[in-house]
Each structure stands twice: as C-alpha cells, then as structure tokens.
Image (spheres, grey):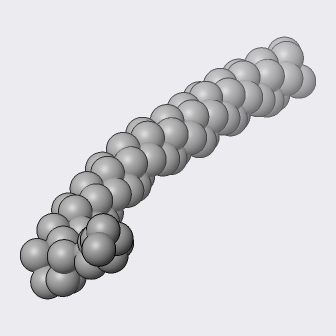
C-alpha cells in the first residue's frame, strides 16, 4: 500500500510539473508572438514616416527649383533679337 501511495504521489507530482511546463511554454509562445506583432507595427510606422519624409523632401525640392527658375527669369537679360537687314 505504501508503494501505491508513493507511486500516486510521484504521478501527481509529474502531472503538476508537466502542466506547469505546458503553461509556461504557452506563455513563452504568446510572448514571442507579441514581440513579432510589435515589430510588425513598428516597421509599418517607420515605413509611413519614411514616406512622409520623402514627400516633404520632394515638395521642398520642387519649391526650391520653381523659385530658382523664377529668379533666373527675372534676373536674366532679355534675349537679343536677331539683327534686321535694312534695305538701302
């Protein structure tokens, strides 16, 4: 009878340990999954911000070039007309 009690205690102890290991494994898998989800969201946010920054740079460059063209046309002298031939 004593051996049966020891066997049942060992079986119950093993069951408890196994349940705890499975629970911690599930917790670890959930944690890893959460990390991957967070990394995915961070990548999307970075991609959106990068696109926004590229748009700002492109718009700034376009304004700069438009301003440079406008200044160039105001400063540049009028083109000389071709000499006309006068009849004598």
Question: Looking at the image, which is closer to me, 54 or 67?
Answer: 67
Give me the residue at 61% from left, 29% from top: 26
Query: Foreground residue, 32 or 59?
Result: 59
Q: Above or below — where is 16 with respect to 58? A: above
Quarter of the image with the C terminus in it: bottom left
Q: Going by the picture, which residue comes out furthest to the front?
A: 88
Quarter that holds the N terminus: top right
Q: In the displayed image of the protein, which residue is found farthest to the left?
A: 74
Q: Is residue 45 left or right of residue 64?
A: right
Q: Is residue 29 above or below residue 11?
A: below
Is 38 placed left or right of 25 in the picture?
A: left
* Residue 79 falls left or right of residue 27: left
Observer-nearest of 61 and 54: 61
* Up/down of 78 relative to 28, above or below: below
Percent position of residue 69, x then y: 24, 69
Let me know if residue 73 appears in the view: yes
Number of residue marks: 0
**Quarter location, residue 15:** top right
Image coordinates of residue 28 in percent, x first then y, are: 60, 40
Q: In the rendered image, which quarter is residue 33 located in? A: top right
Residue 68 seen in the current view: no
Residue positioned 19% across, 76% down in the render: 78
Rendered location of residue 16, percent (x, y): 65, 27
Residue in the picture at 50% in, 40% down: 40
In x, y percent, where is residue 44?
43, 41
Tell me if residue 58 comes above or below residue 4 in the rendering: below
Q: Nearer the viewer, residue 64 or 69?
A: 69
């Amino acid at each position: 009878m004593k051996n049966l009690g020891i066997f049942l205690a060992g079986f119950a102890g093993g069951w408890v340990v196994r349940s705890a290991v499975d629970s911690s494994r599930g917790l670890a898998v959930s944690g890893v999954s959460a990390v991957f989800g967070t990394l995915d969201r961070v990548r999307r946010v970075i991609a959106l911000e990068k696109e926004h920054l590229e748009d700002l740079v492109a718009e700034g460059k376009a304004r700069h070039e438009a301003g440079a063209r406008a200044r160039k046309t105001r400063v540049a002298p009028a083109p000389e007309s071709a000499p006309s031939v006068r009849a004598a």
